[in-house]
Image: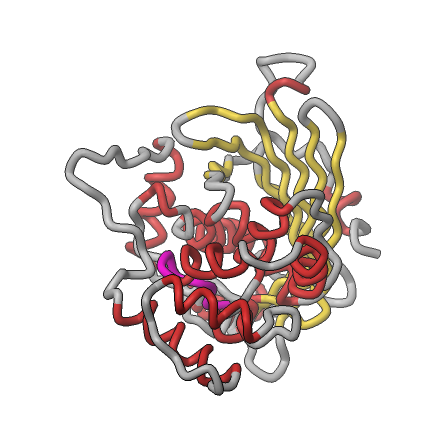
């Protein structure tokens, strides 16, 4: 998943702002595959810009009419022949955004404040960076190679060190996900649908003043919705990778369940607790672990019955073994 850079987002937001409301709402449904409900023009624009893979793909949508692109270019004093077809207009718009020289990452002035990470996240980032970064093809080779070494040891051939796998997975996953948050000033890792199975499933529930649930199917929608949490909503996940905050289990048919709890933050503010449960399956073709299931529960601070709640996993190992049955 590449996504739109800052210049493309600004340009597309202005361009799409000229669309009729029914067309804009319909476009949002198409782009999000009807997985995200929007109730206003602003929400529709945000969803379209978040879930579009590239600016070119967005402009090629049927609902983005030729006249809308032509008027946008005219507003930028870019002269195009009235007979220009839609593809020519799209190409010129893309060239205009490229010519601006604006980087996909927002520039920070010396006076801008950089959001600091909780100490636990900083230590996780440094530790994982010192170990090895994850390749684009899937979950980091660090625990891939570690498991291969164990598999050569007769004492480990019949079992999987799922806790070690879960610990390494969490360190890799949250460093990668948090790196997409533009307020942290980190180098963006290779986030994308390559880390997920094509039939991945993401179930998201959050409780603040009320209860809300979402469900997303497929590698693309799962990847995009998780990405939006940090890149658009600018959340920061601080996992508690300790005995009470991390539990792992293996299922008879090969799936490894990783459950982790932690705190969630935004702009140096504590928002509440989260519980993340993953189902991992090794790909037989590449021998890489990929994400099959994701369940995320967020409990906002306003919904907590006690401010002294600690991020911990309450499930028993036997419960996790049957979690995705």
Q: Does 113 appear in magenta?
A: no
Q: Is residue 136 above or below residue 268?
A: below
Q: Is residue 287 above or below residue 42?
A: below
263 relative to 181 in the view: left or right = right
Residue 176 visible (yes or no): yes
In front of the other: 308 or 73:
73
Residue 255 visible (yes or no): no
Q: Residue furthest front?
A: 82
Q: Quadrant of residue 316?
A: top right
Task: Provide the residue span drawn in magenta.
Answer: 1-7
Q: Main secondary structure of the magenta part?
A: loop
130 relative to 137 in the view: left or right = left
Residue drawn at (15%, 38%) of the image: 110
Instruction: Indicate the quadrant containing the C terminus: top left, top right, bottom left or bottom right.
Output: bottom right
> By what rule are the colours in the image chosen?
secondary structure
Residue 235, image x, y percentages:
49, 39
Count the numbered circles shown. 0
Q: Residue furthest right?
A: 325
Residue 154, image x, y percentages:
57, 70
């Amino acid at each position: 998943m590449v996504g739109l850079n800052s210049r493309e987002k600004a340009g597309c937001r202005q361009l799409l702002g000229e669309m009729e409301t029914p067309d804009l709402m319909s476009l949002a449904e198409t782009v999000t595959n009807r997985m995200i409900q929007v109730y206003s023009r602003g929400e529709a624009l945000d969803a379209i810009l978040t879930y579009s893979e590239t600016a070119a793909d967005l402009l090629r949508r049927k609902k983005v009419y030729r006249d809308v692109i032509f008027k946008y270019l005219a507003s930028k004093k870019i002269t195009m022949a009235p007979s220009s077809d839609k593809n020519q207009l799209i190409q010129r718009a893309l060239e205009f955004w490229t010519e601006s020289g604006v980087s996909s990452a927002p520039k920070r002035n010396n006076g801008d404040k950089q959001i600091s990470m909780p100490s636990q996240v900083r230590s996780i980032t440094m530790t994982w960076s010192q170990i090895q970064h994850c390749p684009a093809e899937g979950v980091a080779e660090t625990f891939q190679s570690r498991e291969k070494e164990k598999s050569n040891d007769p004492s480990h051939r019949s079992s999987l060190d799922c806790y070690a796998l879960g610990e390494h997975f969490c360190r890799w996953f949250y460093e990668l996900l948090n790196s997409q948050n533009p307020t942290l000033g980190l180098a963006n890792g290779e986030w994308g649908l390559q880390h997920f199975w094509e039939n991945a499933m993401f179930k998201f529930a959050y409780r603040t003043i009320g209860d809300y649930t979402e469900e997303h199917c497929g590698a693309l929608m799962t990847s995009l919705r998780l990405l939006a949490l940090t890149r658009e909503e600018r959340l920061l996940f601080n996992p508690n990778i300790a005995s009470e905050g991390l539990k792992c289990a293996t299922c008879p048919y090969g799936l490894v369940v990783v459950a982790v709890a932690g705190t969630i933050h935004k702009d140096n503010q504590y928002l509440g607790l989260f519980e993340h449960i993953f189902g991992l399956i090794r790909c037989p073709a590449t021998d890489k672990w990929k994400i099959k299931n994701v369940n995320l529960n967020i409990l906002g601070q306003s919904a907590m019955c006690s401010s002294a709640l600690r991020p911990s996993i309450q499930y028993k190992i036997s419960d996790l073994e049957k979690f995705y049955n």
